[in-house]
Image (tube, rainbow, N blue to C red):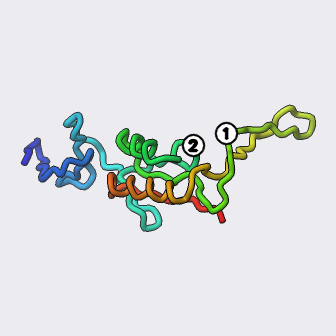
Amino acid sequence: MFFLPSIVLITFTGSLYEKSSLSALSINLKTNKIMPDLSINFAGINAPNPFWLASGPPTNTAEQVISAFRAGWGGAVWKTIGTQVVNVSSRYAGIPFQGRKLAGMTNIELISDRSNTDNLRDIELVKKTFPDRPVVVSLMT
């Protein structure tokens, strides 16, 4: 048990952040600094903070997502998986519009090039390693 001025911090389980007796504060176990509580509940999904990885190349493997969670990210949307696996690479294209050379960009990387079996195994590993972090899976049928 740790005592700080007007705050009592109880029981540490070893996770990066533990709630204090004041619900608006937490202590960072790496730095021992008191920090604001950024936890959220969005549509019934709880996360330690609102900073999430979007579906895309950074959420393609367990190694990438676990690394992000260790760095403090609050959740992740897994790179799109589906039954049709195609060979993809990151490509962006400019779109000419009303005489302008570029009006926007299009991301045409749609789906993981890894099998569903590999992706589901990695998702299970992430959830076992970080059970408190939400992982939403983007599916393409």
What amino acid type is highlighted by mark number 1? Ser
Mark 1 vs mark 2: which is more N-terminal? 2
- Residue tagged by mark 2? 57
Q: Which of 85 and 66 is in front in this view?
A: 85
89 sits left or right of 55 in the view: right
Splitting the image into 4 quarters, where does residue 123 fall? bottom left
Task: Report the number of discs.
Answer: 2
x and y percent of residue 133 in the render?
37, 55
State the residue position of label 1: 90
Where is residue 100 drawn, in percent x and y?
88, 34
Residue type for callout 2: Pro
> Residue at point 38% right, 54% down?
125
Label 1–label 2 contact, CB within 8 A: yes
In the foreground, 125 or 37: 125
Q: Name the image quarter holding residue 92.
A: top right
The residue depicted at 92 percent of the width and 35 percent of the height is 99
